[in-house]
Image (tube, grey):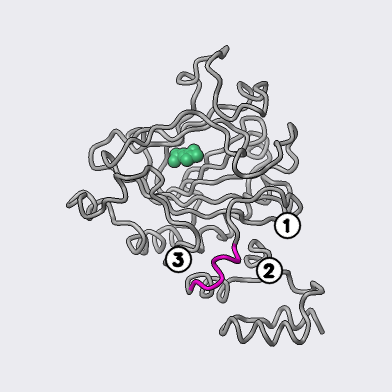
Amino acid sequence: MLTEGQVRQYHQRGFLLLPELLDKDLLESAQANLSVDHPSAQAYFKDPDQYPLYSQTQFSLKRFPFSSIEVNSLLVADDILGAATQLLGSEDIRLNKGELWAKYAGAIDYDQAFHRDFGNHTLLVPRQDQLYKELSIFIFLSDVDEQSGPTAVLPRSLTDPIAFAEMQLPEQLSFEPEQEEFLAVGPAGSVLFYSYDVFHRATQMTGRGKARMTVLGDYRCADATWISRQGWPEAGHQRAMIEFLSSATPQQRALFDIPLPGHHYWNEQTLRDMASRYQGMDLEPYRMAAE
Ligand SMILES: O=C(O)CCC(=O)C(=O)O
């Protein structure tokens, strides 16, 4: 549970950093399974040439579902969803995007210009108030210090007067962005929350031998259907998606637009056919609510 002060801070500044929010066991089991998708720092720096992807693009990320259920589960962990529902102001939320991003110092130039994210997350513009916003998160799976390419964020009090037509920070400003930026540093298990209309940027990885491992997620209220990044049905054939959904709870599945128990969608036929599509999925809550 976030405090009222933390929720207020999120709305006033447009971001919130919570050090070591993630449950320790969840963090450790995710860290233990990361190397299926990205090499560990040790493996990478032993022979960077074996991993050319990381020097070809700074967007060296895997999209959800990741290979391991332990890493997938982070995006639906109780602490994360509890905070997301409070910050979005709704219990009924959806996951729009999941990414597992690994960066390695020296692999490529990671520096970015300040930008707002909404330009390719919606065809509309954000509202000025707190309604219908998208919430983005970075879950740190490695320690992030100033040399590990921390995300830099600008408080919305400085940038909200900038029209929503501007998605890159204009050159003429009444403040010095480098002096005002907040660097999201913290130990593994920390989580950065920010809103999709807040200016932020990736920074350079300057520390020798540093790797930054993060899981990113975007969430929205169920009724903000115009905000979207990733369509889940396109992953419907992937083994990792089937395994993930089969072992998730109904509340967690609802993040992927699977109707909750009690919804009119569920009847004898859909229950029977879902049981054969997802063997091992516990459909009892849906069956009980349908009776
Ligand atoms: O990686 C980061 O710290 C920020 C990345 C980012 O803002 C972006 O790619 O849009």
Tag 1: residue type?
Asp
Residue 70: mark: 3
How packed is label 1: few (under 14 Cα within 10 Å), some, or many (20 or more)? some
Q: Is residue 148 above or below residue 176?
A: below
Residue 238: mark: none
Q: Which residues are magenta?
A: 232-238
User: Can you tell which of label 1 and label 2 is closer to the viewer?
Assistant: 2
Q: Is residue 134 above or below residue 197?
A: below
Q: Which residue is mark 1?
A: 92
Q: Earlier in the sequence, mark 2 or mark 3?
A: 3
User: Can you tell which of label 2 and label 3 is closer to the viewer?
Assistant: 2
Q: Is mark 2 within 8 Å of ligand 1?
A: no
Tag 2: residue type?
Ile
Q: Is residue 138 above or below residue 245?
A: above
Q: Which residue is mark 2?
A: 258
How packed is label 2: few (under 14 Cα within 10 Å), some, or many (20 or more)? some
x and y percentages locating residue 111 in the rendered image: 39, 32
Residue ID at (48%, 53%): 99
x and y percentages locating residue 23 in the rendered image: 49, 57
Q: Is mark 3 within 8 Å of ligand 1?
A: no
Q: Earlier in the sequence, mark 1 or mark 3?
A: 3
Q: Is residue 48 above or below residue 234?
A: above
SS under mark 2 = loop
Q: CA distance from mark 1 to mark 2?
A: 12 Å
Q: Is there a contact, CB below 8 Å, between mark 1 and mark 3?
A: no
Query: How many callouts does the rendering have?
Result: 3
Q: CA distance from mark 1 to mark 3?
A: 24 Å
The quarter of the picture where residue 275 lies is bottom right
Residue ID at (44%, 62%): 25
